[in-house]
Image (tube, rainbow, N blue to C red):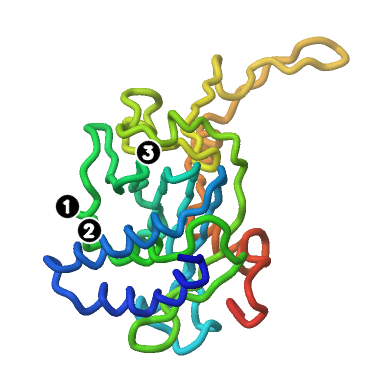
Amino acid sequence: MSARGFLLSLPVVLALVAALPDGVRAQALQATLDARREAMPSGKRSWQETWLVPESGASAPNAAAVTKFGGRVTAYQDGDRERLEFRAARGDELDDPVVVVSDGDAYWLVTRVGATPLVESAKASDAWLALVLAGPPGDGPDARTVPAAGGGVAAIVLRASEPSDFDSDEAFAMRLPQGGSGLVRAGLAAFSPANDAGVTTAAGARGVDQVQTANGSVAVTPDAEAVRWMEAQRVTPAALERFRLEGRLSPYDALPAEVGT
C-alpha cells in the first residue's frame, strides 16, 4: 500500500476511533498497525512531528482555528522496524514519553519493565496514538491537515527530518534503560537527540567571591537570593511553542499563512 493510499484511509480510521467502544478499539488499532507495517518503506530515517490542535479540544471548522500545541512525536525507522516516542502536552507541560517499538512483526508498548503488545495495553484506546499511527510512515509532507471524523479539522501536523545516524540496537530495544540520570528515572526515554537526558554538572559555588581587577583581586559578596530567583525562572514548553508559532520559527515556518493569525 502506498503512503498516499494510507493517508486516504485516515477519515475511516478516525471514525472508528471515535465511535467504537473501548473494548473494540483494539481491533481498529490492530488494523491500523497492519496497514502501517505494509506501507513501511525500506531505508533508515528519523523525523519529528509537531501536532497543533484546536484550542477548544474539539474539531475546528478550518485550519485557521488550529493553534494549540498538542504534543510532539519522534520517529526512528530502519527497514521494517520502528520506534515512536509520543510526548503529549498537558496544560503548559509535556507528559513523559510513551514509547512504542515495532520489531517488524508487531508493535509493543515499551517501558523499563519490558514490552507489552500495544493492542493489549492501556494505550490501545488512546485516540492520539491512533491518529499518529494512521499517518504516513516513511517520508511525509512538511505540513498536513488531519480531518475530524464529523467534519472540520482535528489537527495540523508539521514534520521535520532528524539525523538518521542513530544506534538501531538502542532504538529498537524492548526495554527502556534502567538508572541513568534523574530524568531517565522519572520515565524519560530520552533516546532522541531532541530529548537528551544527559546532565552536565558543575563544581564549585554558584557565583564568585573574588573578582580579578587591574589592581588585584577584590572580594565581593554574591547575592544568594538573586541566584535563587534566576534559577527559579523557567519557560514552560507550551510558552516556548507559542513564541515559536507567533514568530513563525521552525517548525512553524511550514504552516499555511492563515494558521495562528
Q: Percent position (x, y) of residue 220?
A: 66, 20
Seen at 14% across and 73% down, the residue is 21
Number of other residues with Cα within 10 Å of mark 3, as a class: few under 14, some 14 to 19, many 20 or more: many
Q: Percent position (x, y) of residue 139?
A: 57, 58
Instruction: List the residue tagged with mark 1.
Output: 120
Between residues 108 and 99, which one lies in front from this camera angle? 108
Tell me, yes or no, whether the two marked residues, 3 and 1, touch with CB atoms within 8 Å: no
Number of other residues with Cα within 10 Å of mark 2, as a class: few under 14, some 14 to 19, many 20 or more: many
Mark 1 or mark 3, which is nearer the start of the sequence?
1
Q: Quadrant of the N terminus?
A: bottom left
Instruction: List the residue tagged with mark 3.
Output: 188
Tell me, yes or no, whether the two marked residues, 1 and 2, touch with CB atoms within 8 Å: yes
Q: Percent position (x, y) of residue 144?
A: 55, 72
Instruction: List the residue tagged with mark 2.
Output: 124
Q: Percent position (x, y) of residue 68?
A: 47, 70
Q: Secondary structure at mark 1?
A: helix
Mark 3 or mark 2, which is nearer the start of the sequence?
2
Q: Which amino acid, mark 3? A: Leu
